[in-house]
Amino acid sequence: MATEPYRQTASEVLARINSGDLTVEQYAQSLLARIKARDAVVKAWAYLDPARVIEEAKRLDQVPIDERGPLHGVAIAVKDVIYTKDMPTQFNSPAYEGHGPTVDAASIMILRQAGALIFGKTTTTEFAATTQGPITTNPHDSSRTPGGSSSGSGAAVGDFQAPIGLGTQTGGSTIRPGSFNGIYAFKPTWNSISREGQKIYSLILDTLGLYTRSVDDLELLADVFKLEDDMAPDRDFKVMGSKFAVCKTMVWPQVGPGTAAAMEKAAELLRAHGAEVDEIGFPEDLNDLPRWHSTVLNSDGRVAFLPDYCASKGKISKQLIDQVENRGRISRAAQLEAFDKIATARPVVDEMVGKYAAVLVPSVPDEAPEGIDSTGSAAFNGIWTALHNPVINIPGFHGGNNMPIGISLVAPRYYDRHLLAVGRRVGEIFEQEGGWKPKN
Amino acid sequence: MATEPYRQTASEVLARINSGDLTVEQYAQSLLARIKARDAVVKAWAYLDPARVIEEAKRLDQVPIDERGPLHGVAIAVKDVIYTKDMPTQFNSPAYEGHGPTVDAASIMILRQAGALIFGKTTTTEFAATTQGPITTNPHDSSRTPGGSSSGSGAAVGDFQAPIGLGTQTGGSTIRPGSFNGIYAFKPTWNSISREGQKIYSLILDTLGLYTRSVDDLELLADVFKLEDDMAPDRDFKVMGSKFAVCKTMVWPQVGPGTAAAMEKAAELLRAHGAEVDEIGFPEDLNDLPRWHSTVLNSDGRVAFLPDYCASKGKISKQLIDQVENRGRISRAAQLEAFDKIATARPVVDEMVGKYAAVLVPSVPDEAPEGIDSTGSAAFNGIWTALHNPVINIPGFHGGNNMPIGISLVAPRYYDRHLLAVGRRVGEIFEQEGGWKPKN
């Protein structure tokens, strides 16, 4: 018996649809059945209209074969801070209940043109800007958070409710849920995909993020979004003979036992497969990067949430009100110092990271914590968001409660395709030998 | 007889509305009559529905006095790359004919909350990204361009069709029309006003711009948009005893006779009023700034216009197609070098500029050129856009054809309110003694 379509990756499903083995409607029905079975527990969706999904699937089935795009029929779960012209976009904010401007974000325009089936909207923290979790639970243990702010997209992809999810990252909003849900998460180089139509928190930090359950699927998306390095990546990249580094940054002391063990095992596995793995520190004069990130973030929040503050102060959370009112009393001088110092750090870190096939850093302190009120710590992600480097979360490890833990691989800016090529081989090893196996 | 309301600045009109001397409806009627008389020549509007304007004016007249905002009834002309929930937003692009998502840009949300009368949409070059002018003419000579890309907002404010206009600037799209139309134009520090809901060309360059016919009106807007320096500006700033500098940057050789004379006269006037005026150069190691600006712009266009390229390549101009296809063959390395070098330059230039009350630079090479096909050169603006500094165009001078020429004053980043305080006094001098008097 063929695998249930909902279990398959986008690449696998595409092959079946293109061979005539599966219609888009059948595929959509499979996903909808999975969601129906699981939604009461996982609650990943902020908006999902099965009738509309089927209608759209039928329309795609009518598209002549020679007019089909590279993502024909592939279902996409869209974080609810990204505009979709045919669905509401509500930002998990009471100020935007029922809000649904008839416009697609840039990313959605590109995906639709590629034939994707825009499936529904997934939960987020308020404006993707707070750490107060939505109602979504971790698909591997419903007593735990799926992470955030891209909670719903991470959980939906982790739970086989969609093969691909769109997230965003300003601190750790893509990579952290990637680790917590045991899936691939890719934060490409800043501004390598247009963020038009995606709620702004910080212009210099916000990045569209991608969730999949395979590197093949990330490659598909990278093609569609035209991510291009200067040099074509080595598609035959081999771990054997390559050089990696484990980087212990200034936030390393926040690592928990699960991630510490995973990092150690990751290095061992790479060595066992013939790679050299250095251990490197981080330039000491950049030790304030987390503070600079936070300063920029809060200063940018002061600007980003002013419109909502003016229009409906009573409906936005205190954290955002405090940013608008600059309760942290961040001076312009401090803001500029942080902005400028991060900028100076970028080429320095590129050069450091560029000496290796990729640099390994934690994705999260540990497994997904218990409870869904807080989406967990982004301590390990913020500096890479600020630095604009591409980051991929590779799943495969687990913590003390058999919850997934992923490891981040980092490359220099605009080495996105290189990072995917490396991530593919590293992923094969980590997934096979890292020790985590999902229960359901 | 009282001055016709349409002739007045926003501050003057506000005083009349607040004193009960004028209703918002009467004010709107005055503006609409002016537009009716002039629109066949100036053609500043991409969308204007007089009935809707009057309806909205009547609604504002019903707002109880104690619930009125600081811009109660003030008419705003909005560049047609900025979303307005009750009007189309068409980007001067055939791909967006009739496009009208029901959402307000962040700037519009803030202005509406302040009680402004969102009047209509003004013409722009395609996506505010090309130099191919729209049908709009210069209100002071209809055989000439009003500049661009904020063509309609510049012309509308210059022609007394609206007291305030919103523009945007990625190269010189706000300051250049300011000069060509003989009005105040203010480009605040980058990202000091949210650009949410404003078409993206380049994240690191795009800035909302403001047009008025007085510094009072810019101060009003700066209050509403909560532009705040670290230090409260000296509201009693005096030119007497202050220190200015004329800065001849690497683009100085592109200056024409009109602007050269205006710059000389500006320095003379300041000296005559008791200021010291230095002449300074620009750091030589930053001579490539125009090239870096162009490199970033074109690389960012590659990302920004990909969605439209995918969705409707046949409907976007060749210039944008070339950017998406990277016809300039800009490498990622070159792109990052430009991005990083501009970043390094910002604090250096801040320090240089911060030694003076303000630094004077040309706004444009000369008067508005003949013809409306091209919106003119942005040579003098791009570097300041890249550097993120606040810039104000002060009108007052003229060229060989009695067309207006303005001078740019520049301050360090987040010295926006300081720059307005200085601009107020400098503006009094330039307007009175610069020699330009509008004909109509």
Image: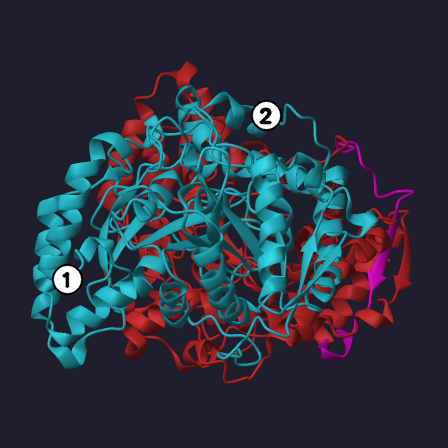
Chain colours: A cyan, B red
Residue B73 to residue B193: above or below: above
State left or right for residue A123 relative to residue A22. Answer: right
Q: Position of residue B322 (x, y in %)?
A: 45, 81
How many dots with numbers? 2
What residue does disc 2 label? A325
Specify start and end residues of the magenta stretch as a single range.
B233-256
Marks 2, 1: nearer the viewer = 1
Q: For the point 37% across and 44% down, which residue is it? A: A154
Which numbered disc flags the more N-terminal residue, 2 or 1? 1
- What chain is tagged by disc 1? A
Indicate whether residue B243 is drawn in magenta.
yes
Residue B54 to residue B150: above or below: above
State left or right for residue A353 relative to residue A73. Answer: right
Residue B61 to residue B394: above or below: above
Decide which of A134, B177 is in the foreground and name it. A134
Looking at the rendered structure, the secondary structure element under dot 1 is loop
- What chain is tagged by disc 2? A
Q: Main secondary structure of the magenta part?
A: loop
When asked about the image quadrant of residue B398, the answer is bottom right
Q: Position of residue A183 (x, y in %)?
A: 40, 50
State left or right for residue B319 relative to residue A440. Answer: right
Q: Amino acid at mark 2?
A: Glu
Kindly tell me whether residue B111 is visible in this rendering. no
What residue does disc 1 label? A2
Q: For the point 83% across and 61% down, which residue is it? A: B246
Looking at the rendered structure, the secondary structure element under dot 2 is loop
Q: Residues within 10 Å of mark 2 (few under 14, many from 20)?
A: some
Decide which of A193, B98 is in the foreground and name it. A193
Q: Amino acid at mark 1?
A: Ala
Which residue is most to the front?
Answer: A272
Q: For the point 26% across and 38% down, which residue is it? A: A45
Kindly tell me whether residue A114 is visible in this rendering. yes
